Amino acid sequence: MTVSGLAEQTSRPAALACPHGVHEGHCTTCPVRNVSVCAALASDELALLGSLSEDVTFADKSTLLMQGDPANAVYNLTEGMVRLYRLMPDGRRQIVGFLLPGDFVGLALSQRYAFSADAIGPVAACRFTRASFASLVDTKPHLLRRLHEAATHELTQAQDHMVLLGRRNAEEKVASFLISLRDRVVRLGRSAITLNLPMTRHDMADYLGLTLETVSRTISKLARDHVILVVPDGIRLLNPARLEQIGEG
Amino acid sequence: MTVSGLAEQTSRPAALACPHGVHEGHCTTCPVRNVSVCAALASDELALLGSLSEDVTFADKSTLLMQGDPANAVYNLTEGMVRLYRLMPDGRRQIVGFLLPGDFVGLALSQRYAFSADAIGPVAACRFTRASFASLVDTKPHLLRRLHEAATHELTQAQDHMVLLGRRNAEEKVASFLISLRDRVVRLGRSAITLNLPMTRHDMADYLGLTLETVSRTISKLARDHVILVVPDGIRLLNPARLEQIGEG
DNA sequence: CGTCAGCTTGACTCATCTCAACTAGGGTGG
DNA sequence: CCACCCTAGTTGAGATGAGTCAAGCTGACG
């Protein structure tokens, strides 16, 4: 547990990692500029942010960070998907969240990471050292406020997920997972009818507190009922209203 | 859902609600002075805090606040225990946390409460209006930082609880619930061997994602195995090490 | 073309839930 | 003071949703 996953990251010139401009200005042209914590900042502050951050990429299945490691960096995801999870000593895994572009990792500002994170497919992110990000936060009170808003929003989501894990059955779990993933994707301005699912059934199972077989069977049942259609690497929502209904309000 | 639980609260003179001094100075003599968010503040600031807050009490089973209601107040619990929970439309309940003295309710600073809260036994708390607390936070950056720390700590606890709900069996759930409650009580400087359990089996079940019968059976089994001893209104920890072992690391 | 990871499906098991009966303690009103 | 009721808890017997184990399918990739 002492080897940091950071070793696996590929740090590279901005021209390669970020297709949106030269390094110094990358924040102003960031694809997640308006959905992220950074939206709190004015454009002169963004230039400062750009000078403090670095664009990095991660290969499929590579580790961004590991639970228990010193929290040396914080990340803002710009492309791809990341799973956050905890492992029990005997290997049981609970995925506590999937990150989408715009999501922030490490906003705890704490000494050590509380979970592990790795890439599902290729990932691009914006990286800050903890020290530089912490000192930035010290000088920008509205950034701290934004961070706190993000944290409380996550807390609300965490409570939603506790309801799901503790009180919903398999079909409700899968349905509300699909609906809430769709809602997040829509908020990013992407397609609402065909949902990309880059994670495995096993990942979904470890997120929903099920086994992969139960996830598979439940998806098959929803498809049999014409609520969804299984397509390569994802599903199509044939009857989103029904799916919402199954997932409860 | 529109009637605020605040109607049930008993607001009273500080001399009655707070045994520790006159109203103006109640924060400096507060029993949770050092375990709470308020520990971030200097003594002159505490005087200000005292002038903004009000001591209130709640009767057993009374409601402090309800999910969806406008978040008009924030509370700092000073005595007793509170359950936080969400209800599903069909009445299923998930308790997302139990509050102990020193715990803060409503640190989201958001428009509406994300959960309901009610008293388990008699409760005393320190009440701020949302507006006055928000403006206080605006003028005290280290209070915001403290709030953010508290929020991220809660987030970590929430993730722990997701592991429990998603990946632990009944015996592990009950064992780790008892251990973590003991740890919190110890941090408040109270007894470690006899644990008071003012909540019902039903409450425990709704916290652990079980039924009350399963909780009862599991407690009976732990008692049969001489790991705990059931006493009126609580349990005695006969073999805490074994209990920790069952609850996993 | 063989291998392998991911997915699906079937048959069976079992942990937890459901339904139900019974006990204990506390409060209340006749 | 006792009879009654009500809430909380315990325990048993049986039902069931999800887990386990196992087989087979598919597509990607070397």
Image (tube, coloured by chain):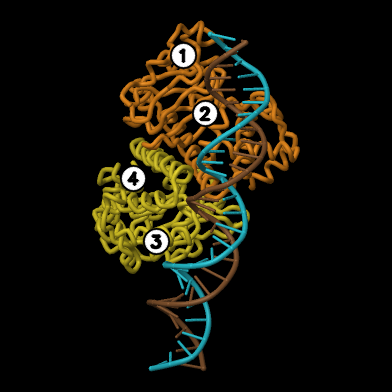
Chain colours: A orange, B yellow, C brown, D cyan
Question: Could you tell me residue A228's position as x and y percent?
Answer: 71, 35
Quadrant assignment for the N terminus of chain B: bottom right
- The nearer-to-camera label among 4 and 3 is 4
Q: Find out whether the residues at labels 4 and 3 contact each other: C-beta distance under 8 Å.
A: no
Judging by the rendered image, the residue that carries numbered circle 4 is: B37
Chain letter, disc 4 residue = B
When the figure is inspected, residue A13 is found, relative to residue B19, above or below; the finding is above
Quadrant assignment for the C terminus of chain B: top left
What residue is shown at x 47% (from left), y 27% (from top)? A104
Question: Could you tell me residue A14's position as x and y percent?
Answer: 48, 8
Foreground residue among A183 and A245: A245
Judging by the rendered image, the residue that carries numbered circle 3 is: B56
Badge 2 and badge 3 in a common chain: no
Q: CA distance from mark 4 to mark 3?
A: 18 Å
Please give left or right for residue A225 compared with residue B114 in the image: right
Badge 2 and badge 4 in a common chain: no
What residue is shown at x 48% (from left), y 53% (from top)? B95
